Image: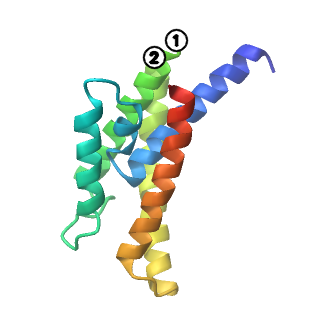
């Protein structure tokens, strides 16, 4: 494998991680790659989402509207990452959107299984999910910066 292929793989892997972040928390990827003057608004939107997610009135992440929002957020963030690295923004957008949809379904199902079979309250599982999102976000951001 050539060095160029390795570099391309790493960029597209980061794009997939950004998409997965948005699948779990829609504003996580935009907040992770935000640059001034967008850091404040993106962080505020993410903080609001982290609170809203714990409320019983939060919609199902796999419902059409929320899922589309997650795909768009993941796709746009991944496209921005790829573009900044002189890689295909279109490929990044497709990878990010697909990863967001996949992660949304996987995280939703995992959260249901944990709450049902391990009898852990949903808000606690949501906090654990937040910790995973924060950890992955920091790892991606450190490579993106």
User: What residue is pinned by disc 2?
Assistant: 83
> Of the numbered discs in the image, which one, if any, rests on residue 117?
none
Q: Residues within 10 Å of mark 1 (few under 14, many from 20)?
A: few
Q: Seen in the image, is 64 located left or right of residue 116?
A: left
The N terminus is located in which quarter? top right
Question: What residue occupies the far left of the structure in this picture?
Answer: 57
One can see residue 68 in this view = no
Q: Position of residue 135 (x, y in %)?
A: 52, 50
Q: How crowded is mark 2: few (under 14 residues within 10 Å), some or many (20 or more)?
A: some
Mark 2–mark 1 CB contact (< 8 Å): yes
Calculate the distance from the C-alpha at mark 2 to the C-alpha at mark 1: 5 Å
Q: Residue at x 50, y 25 (%)?
A: 145
Q: Position of residue 23 (x, y in %)?
A: 41, 50
Per the image, label 1 sits on a secondary structure element best described as loop
The quadrant holding residue 90 is top left
Q: Which residue is drawn at 71% across and 14% down?
A: 4
Position of 96 relative to 1 (above/below): below
Q: Where is residue 68 in the image (x, y as percent from the top left)?
A: 29, 45
User: What residue is pinned by disc 1?
Assistant: 86
Count of labels shown?
2
Q: Where is residue 14 in the image (x, y as percent from the top left)?
A: 55, 34
| Color style of the picture | rainbow
Position of 131 relative to 19 (above/below): below
Q: Which residue is drawn at 41% across and 67% down?
A: 127
One can see residue 55 in this view = yes
In front: 26, or 51?
A: 51
The quadrant holding residue 143 is top right
Q: Seen in the image, is 88 located left or right of residue 76?
A: right
In front: 50, or 118?
A: 50
Per the image, label 2 sits on a secondary structure element best described as helix
């Amino acid at each position: 494998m050539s060095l160029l292929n390795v570099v391309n793989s790493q960029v597209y892997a980061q794009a997939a991680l950004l998409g997965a972040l948005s699948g779990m928390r829609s504003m996580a990827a935009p907040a992770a790659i935000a640059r001034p003057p967008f850091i404040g608004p993106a962080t505020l939107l993410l903080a609001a989402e982290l609170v809203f997610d714990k409320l019983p009135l939060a919609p199902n992440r796999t419902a059409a509207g929320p899922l589309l929002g997650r795909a768009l957020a993941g796709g746009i963030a991944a496209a921005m990452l790829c573009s900044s690295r002189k890689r295909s923004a279109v490929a990044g957008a497709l990878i990010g959107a697909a990863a967001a949809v996949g992660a949304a379904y996987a995280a939703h199902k995992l959260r249901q299984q944990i709450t049902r079979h391990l009898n852990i309250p949903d808000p606690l599982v949501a906090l654990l999910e937040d910790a995973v999102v924060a950890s992955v976000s920091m790892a991606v951001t450190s490579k993106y910066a």
